[in-house]
Image (cartoon, grey):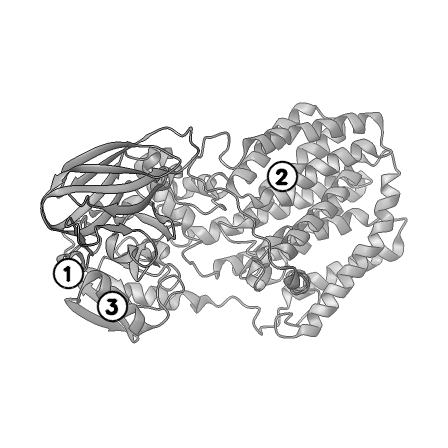
Amino acid sequence: MGMIVVGLCHSFQVAAFLPLDADRATPAVVAEALQIHGLDALNAWHSTQDNWLLSSILPQFPFYILLGQQPWIPALCGWLSFVTTCAVCGLLAALISVSQSQACWAGLSLCVVLLLLNPLTLGPIGFLAHPASHGITCFWGLAALIPCVLVLKGYSRWLLTLTTILLLIATISDPWARAAFVLPLTISSMGLALLRSSWHDKKMAVWIAISSVPVWLAGTHGFGLFPGIPGTQFTKGPLTDIPHHVALGFSGIAVMLNIVPGASPIIQSWAQWVSGGILLVLFVLSVSIFRQNLQDQKGGPRSFIQLFCILSISITFVAFSLSNFAVGLDTIRLLGNIAFLLPLYLCCCAGKTQKLLTNGIILTAVCGVLAGLVPSGKGDAIRPDALSNTTQLLAFLDNHHLSHGYGGYWSTQANASRLLSNGRVTIRPVAIRGADVIYPREQQVFDEWYRAQDVAPSETRQFFIAQPDDELCENTSACMSLAQHNFGPPNETLFWNSVPIMIWHKTLFPSAPMLKILQRAPKLSSFPAEGHSIPLNPITAPSLLWRGWASIGPDGAWSGAQQAGIMVRLTGHSAPLCLTMRVSGRLSAPLQSVTLRRDDTIIAQWAVHAGTPATYCTGFLPEGDAYLVLERTAPPHDNQRLLPGILLSAISRPAD
């Protein structure tokens, strides 16, 4: 028990020093919205496909209700999720032990090994102690195995209802769970039914497979209960990159399961080869033990877990090697399940009949524990000052009475700003879209963040942090030019550590464009001798469109919000204005009601259909600069992403 306490202290120390960034603040951000808007906030949130809604955000919500918006809660929740996942692994090891006398020893030993994993495994490589990552998914997926083992040991098959619920929570929140847990569970249960197992095991294995059917049927949106979740995407990389991805995956596993005390597997590559080589040898040697267990008709639970571990490790490693996402060690989080399953699998293979292999596994476990207790200090430590830049920036803004502004998601850790400043400073993330146009970020945001009501009426100064960010600008001068292009010259400019803080005495996301921007709009004439039609394409669209558009292609521009702005300068005599457009979807898609406004006055209402773009015209409009707004009905859950897109192909005026 003493080593368990040491492991708990070790893992807590690592988790406590993990720097709070924009992603780790996600549960806190959504919890704040849940307190205001209720459960509807779950669908209003512009999540990524890894949304963590049920697996992380809702379970952590009570912490924020009871304790408030505290910056240490994400670290506490991340640590608790890691510890409970280790406990689940220990319980599984105890349940499948050959004898009851070995059960407690096996479970506690596995817990010690997992609690003393490399700090990098909990932090910037494995992400296992993060409050919103695949480590959370491992808890739900592994917990779903416990009812399966109990059923195979003779308990009621109704326990498998719990397996279905746990897997639904995991897969709706994180599509990665399908590859890491649901598919291996389905295949291993069917495999157990086909192997030389007892009739009871065969029958229960079929029921385990049936318990996964609702998970497959639920789909991405959980039987339609969560329409705000984006669709699942898996992008395959080029075949030439597969060897590199395999090597990266092997290195990542060796780093996560480092068994060389005092060595840094990041800096000292030989430590990777030693750790990876020993683990690979043990894995290969254990295959023969696994084959023997398959012949044991009384070893159904153990065979099931072993088969599951092999399939989960294999499937996720193959998917990692084939994807185009494997670009660095930080993407090893997609193999985080291996950090739990490989030790669990080796624990299953240890036994009195295989003394050589068992002694090797025990020696490896001891080395892993020592490696966790004696880190190298050369790149493995989590530095407590990693947050200093963000906290200093927020203190600077607060000292200069700046409470609301915009910046890059990663460069300013925007979504963590309220949590780190105790609500005194709010930074909303923005990104560049199209030709030098600053838009609200598409993911990890709420639509209401970019409306006038998000800013307190007393706040008359808004700022933009001109700090380079991959989603915004590549250097400081480009950031400043971008901001001036979108918002005009600033009224003030402050500097924090050479980072410009540009300040305007106005709203930076108004409901209409500035006069300067409107005057750059193209002319649209009604005279026959002049061009009176403008096709929408990447060349013409930037000067014609304002906010509310999602993307621009050769066939037109797609709207991305309830309101999409069009800027045009009408010349010549009064004439109708015509828009060529269509709605996304099949020909059978319902008609979409579209209203066209000019200066808050309705000038046309149409029912736009899908299929081939059609032309819709207004009444006669006089000449002059015009800001037009394509407006649709409010989206469900206040989520602009849930509206069908409208493709605007051309804008024109009749010649006579």
Given residues 458 and 493, the one toward you in this image is: 493
Q: Secondary structure at mark 1?
A: helix
Type of the residue with mark 3: Ile
Q: Position of residue 354 (x, y in %)?
A: 89, 52
Label 1: which residue?
516
**What's the CA distance linking mark 1 and mark 2?**
59 Å
Evaluate if marks 1 and 2 touch, with contact meaning CB atoms under 8 Å apart.
Answer: no
Type of the residue with mark 1: Lys
> Could you say which quadrant of the image residue 539 lies in?
bottom left
> Could you say which quadrant of the image residue 116 lies in?
bottom right
Q: Quadrant of the C terminus?
A: top left
Label 2: which residue?
143
Given residues 444 and 297, the one toward you in this image is: 444
- In this rendering, the label closer to the viewer, 2 or 3: 3
Q: Secondary structure at mark 2?
A: helix
Evaluate if marks 3 and 1 touch, with contact meaning CB atoms under 8 Å apart.
Answer: no
Label 3: which residue?
501
Q: How many marks?
A: 3
Q: Earlier in the sequence, mark 2 or mark 3?
A: 2
Q: Position of residue 516 (x, y in %)?
A: 15, 60
Q: Position of residue 135 (x, y in %)?
A: 57, 50
